Amino acid sequence: MSVTTLNWVQICKLDDILPLRARVIPAAKGEIAIFRCSDDSVFALRNRCPHKQGHLSEGIVHGHRVACPLHGWVIDLESGEAVAPDNGCTPRLPVKVEDGVIWLGNDVAAG
Amino acid sequence: MSSSSHFVRERLVVVGNGMAGMRTVDELLKLDPARYDIVVFGAEPHVNYDRIALSSVLAGEKNVDDIVINSREWYAEHNITLHTGDPVVAIDLAAHTVTSKSGVTVGYNRLLIATGSKPIVPPIPGLNLPGVCAFRDLKDVDTMIDAAAHYRRAVVIGGGLLGLEAAWGLKRRGMEVAVVHLMPTLMERQLDESAGKLLQRDLTERGISFFTNGQTEMVTGTDRVTGIKLADGREAPADLVVVAIGIRPETELARKAGLEVNRGIVVGDDLSTSDPDVYAVGECCEHRGAVVGLVAPIWDMAKVCAHHLAGGGTLIYQAQATATRLKITGIDVYSAGQLAAGEDEDEIILRDARRGAYRKLVMRGGQVVGTVLYGNVTDGEWYFDLIRKKTDVGDISDRMILGKAATQGGVAPAFDLNAMADDAQVCGCNGVCKGTIVSTINAKKLTTYDEVKSHTKASASCGSCSTLVREILAATLGVEVAKPEIPKVCKCTGCTHEEVRAAIIERKLKTQDAVREAMGWMTKDGCASCRPALNYYLLCAWPGEYIDDSRSRFVNERVHANIQKDGTYSVLPRMWGGTTNAVELAAIATVASKYGAPEIKVTGGQRLGIYGVKKQDLPAVWAELGEAGLVSGHAYGKALRTVKTCVGREWCRFGTQDSTTLGKELEKMTWGNWTPHKFKMAVSGCPRNCAESSIKDLGVICVDAGFELMVGGNGGIELRGTDKLCTVATEEEVLEYAAAFMQLYREEARYLDRTAPYVERVGIDYIRAKIVDDTENRKALQARFLYAQTFLQDDPWAERATQGVDAHEFAKLASPQEALN
Ligand code: SRM
Ligand SMILES: Cc1cc2nc3c(=O)[nH]c(=O)nc-3n(C[C@H](O)[C@H](O)[C@H](O)COP(=O)(O)OP(=O)(O)OC[C@H]3O[C@@H](n4cnc5c(N)ncnc54)[C@H](O)[C@@H]3O)c2cc1C
Ligand code: SF4
Ligand code: FES
């Protein structure tokens, strides 16, 4: 088992993302989608649907969920899990908002 | 026949692995599973399947796996030896043996013959040609499906239940279908003349043609069928001919064995034949002079026969009235008992021309003895129950025709579980009565319709009793079902589309939040279903006031391009009426190569699509297209899509009007408009209809005298031809009527209903009343449409390309200093 530590990286301001929308940020392991919900909570997920890699960033955001634009799977932003009856999971990334700034936890493999 | 085990079981041999035989075995296993060592011979190479559902397989509504009744595992589990594809060719009554075609000889203690029927083959030349088949088994269905995939035209001989279901299935599979029927009206054995004619009218509207009073004289062709000839000289070309003129009991085997055979194998009330060790059930047998052709009486036979095979001696089979339903989606026909009044009977008839509905009751004394229902068949089972039970309806007999609800008071009939007798039959196909459904729900703790269906088999075949099954489930569980279900906007609310639309206007609700709050939404920001709907309803109700919410639009409408499976986009500029020019073509070619779009395609909408554009490049692509005068084609939207045209009078030798110019004008008037679902138009220069006007939301067909306007067509998932609205004389009127119709649809349709379901829901007569008959209303609709257009006709591409609208949408966030994983 490898040990990982988090390295917090500043991404953008909260207001760079409209409520109920998402924006995309390029990353080594594939795009990351950052979602802002109507209650201003923020979630970060890999930008690919567990079904057929649809870009979740393009989906309609509602509550803490997003509906994939390709075939309508609904992904729970809190867990990354597809909502029943569908089955699958999109990896989440640690994210936090401090003083109106969004930070992403980048894992740094150590040891 | 001896066995080495000390407990010697008797052997039951079953000839015929069909519905009657296997149902009898099933009943027998319930009564006494250990009594017999069972051997089954089937002529078909399959396990036992639901023959009724062949119609659904042909129509593409079910596949072969869905209709298997008993799998091979089932036979194995019950220690039944099954010989498939091996018909019995001889029975030796004296020796108590049967012999099969492959040479297997098996002894029996009891024999059950269930050989069903064979299709009647009329004595006409040409029936042995390739491309001719019957409609009886899976092999026939395979032949038809294969023909539909490779050929175009089908003729069905026989306009009875089977013939019409075959015709509909082939039509659904894209063939041109004609039906030849000997009699003047369809299904004359099950329907009276009026209902038969309504049926013919409705099927004609669905594109099936008919040759009634048609006697087929020969089937033509040398290597394969090419057509048919009728005795009166009429001819029809055909690549496939389906013969469905009737069935005859399959009795040859029994006759050869020396059993008493009349029309069918003669059986007594206990279903035994002239040999006491031999029984017969199903379509092959004749009971008190009558043969059967539906499964309901066969299930009764199976019960009685199993009882006697299990050693019982009391049950007797009694023929019951049967009811018929046609399994053609969207066409509801029901008949039971006597079709017409004789000397001592009266007929009561009710017609509802607007809905095309018709019902008839035949009454004798105070009893219902027959019914024919067309269009609305919800009361069918109720009448059928009264007929079978010979219930005296006495003093309500004059109101009977109005149906159960009206007769028993109350406007909205709540389903009353207790009022229904336990032995009232719910599913005629599978012989399931109410009591069985209720006790299964309780015993197995079922909670969903699908569970009830799979455990009881009720509604598992033709599906026409599914509403009743749902009601029984709901009543048994003590929950409510709304009937008939008017769709709710989505799971966030109990409100219907109509309630929401009315409230938006009456209560002046002008934002989505206001609607959700006023109407008691269960979610704060709705869901992916209701947000786009509310956004549209508000936009339609408050033109110029409501601010479109891009976050409530599906990605294509938010981004103004169609998302592709790899996350790139397609760009389809408008080409007015399907015309273009050198400047536009050059611009398309330039952007495609400059932005690396791998494909340019001529779409089905008479214009060019540029495929594989990256999202961040969209604004630049649009800017360059805009410089050449191209605007968004809205190929992505629930919006005005294309107006297809033909060359028309300007070039074509048949053209009667300038269809191309008229199409362009229609497109110029309507582009940019948002609608409940996409909206497509076409203008054809003459009735040859090269622009396919008859499958458009609004189609124009030019004729010498003016312009025929057609509405409600759809060439998509479910093909629907237009209804004719009216004929107008001038191009101005075409524009006026088109605007009015579009606005009526915008204001009244449910979000995501195309015009086809909308027109079907309200009826073409209603639309005529609002648009053709009421000039003032038409002009008011037109005015509202044109007013909305003053806000909607801004090119969304230009705004984004040059005015920075939604800029955040197209830019990715900048990469942070540190590389992210
Ligand atoms: C591009 C095109 C196919 C082509 O290569 O020719 C096309 C492409 C799509 N059609 Fe279509 N349809 C195209 C003409 C048609 C036609 C033919 C016509 O318009 O004459 C029909 C049947 C006519 C009709 O609508 O009545 C048609 C019936 C459908 C349907 C079924 C609609 C229905 O009511 O049953 C859908 C599904 C839907 O809208 O829900 C659909 C959906 C789609 C979608 C949007 C699927 C999707 O959701 O992504 C496809 C988008 C691909 C893309 O990115 O461009 N497409 N589609 C055609 C675009 C025409 C244009 O220039 O705008
Ligand atoms: C397309 C279609 C739609 C229908 N729709 C309806 C409907 O909506 N409602 C309704 O009530 N009824 C409907 N029916 C009628 C219903 O399917 C029949 O009434 C029912 O199948 C008859 O059952 P059966 O067992 O008597 O005959 P079958 O189901 O035909 O079974 C007889 C079997 O015996 C086999 N066999 C024959 N001779 C031999 C032999 N010598 N050795 C071994 N096997 C042999 C046959 O191959 C066949 O498999 C429909 C029928 C068809 C074809
Ligand atoms: S028919 Fe239409 S929806 Fe289906 S694949 Fe072709 S373009 Fe896509
Ligand atoms: S890719 Fe997301 S639903 Fe299919």
Image: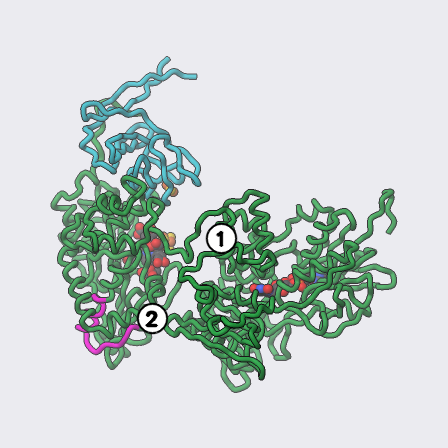
Chain colours: A cyan, B green
Is residue B273 visible in the rendered image? The answer is yes
Tell me residue A90's x, y (percent).
Answer: 37, 32
Amino acid type indicated by mark 2: Asp
Subunit of label 2 = B
Q: Quadrant of ligand 1?
A: bottom left
Category of crowding for the residue at label 2, using alpha-carbon neighbours closer than 10 angstroms: few (below 14), some (14–19), many (at least 20) = many
Subunit of label 1 = B
- Secondary structure under badge 2? strand
User: Magenta stretch containing residue A81, yes or no?
Assistant: no
Q: CA distance from mark 1 to mark 2?
A: 34 Å
Image quarter in which the C terminus of chain B is found = top left
Rendered residue at 39%/58% (across/down): B717
Category of crowding for the residue at label 1, using alpha-carbon neighbours closer than 10 angstroms: few (below 14), some (14–19), many (at least 20) = some
- Which sits earlier in the primary sequence, circle 1 or circle 2? 1
Q: Which mark is residue B801?
A: none
Residue ID for mark 2: B723
Q: Nearer the viewer, residue B770 or B572?
A: B770
Give the magenta-colored segment's residue range. B725-740
